[in-house]
Amino acid sequence: MTTEEKKQALDEIAKKIAATKGGPLAMPGINPVPGEGNPDAKIILIGEAPGFNENIQMRPFVGQSGKLMRKNLVACGFSEGEVYITNIVKFRPPENRDPTPAEIAFFQPFLDEQISIIGPEYIVTLGRFSMYKFLGENISIGRIHGIPAQIDWQGKKITIFPMFHPAAALRAGGVMRQFESDFKKLTSLINGSKTATMEPQIELVQKNDVKQLELI
């Protein structure tokens, strides 16, 4: 696809997301937050679900945790205009609670289509729920954050880079230091330095249609 074709395709997905009126999350005052960014992005950042500010502005990661994420993104040399930012769930859960399996499953086709259209080289998962989608649920984000893994996505190799959610970094100084350090590791990885390794005793469980998980 050309850049314009990708943009049009992403716009169509956004319309389909809006047409669901929230699906299992439907309620008065809820707004769609499909995602934003470069349709040719090399990097997609995927969080869990929109929050209060995201629901109002209809944009992902614009609250305090979003500002932290965007600040680190720019500090590490990435322009916001060259990445794509979204969530696994496209509407705000009540009181910012964790998304349920049913909600994640409902919005999965939209996210999968976004990934397929953009065709990124890297996916940065922010928080455990987006990490689970690609690397399985039998692992701890505390053990594998900042460690890249390569998957086969519809015939294309994509590097998954798991990170803590920025909201967790705002709640704990130790997590903040790890969060900032992981962004620096991501920069090194994308610039060609593949120094991070996975602890061999960690078993990564494949999920959905993701096949052939292969550690870097």
Image (cartoon, rainbow, N blue to C red):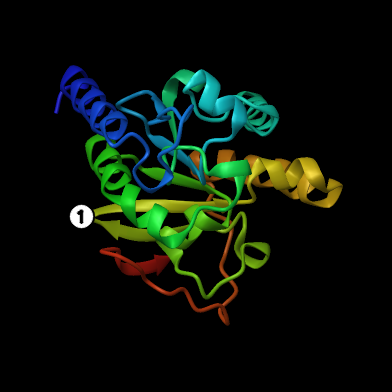
Q: Is residue 130 left or right of residue 143?
A: left
In this picture, is 39 found above or below 153? above
User: Residue 95 occupies which quadrant of the picture?
Assistant: top right
Residue 138: x %, y % from top left = 52, 75
Q: Quick one: 135 or 16, which is closer to the camera?
A: 16
In this picture, is 54 found above or below 165? above
Q: Quadrant of the N terminus?
A: top left
In this picture, is 56 found above or below 111? above
Q: Is residue 213 left or right of residue 172?
A: left
Q: Quick one: 51 or 183, which is closer to the camera?
A: 51
Residue 216 shows in the view: no
Residue at 32%, 52% in the rendered image: 106
Residue 44: x %, y % from top left = 42, 38
Provide the residue designation for mark 1: 154
Residue 211: x %, y % from top left = 28, 67
Q: Is residue 14 left or right of residue 214?
A: left
Residue 18 shows in the view: yes
The residue type indicated by label 1 comes to: Gln
Residue at 56%, 30% in the rendered image: 61
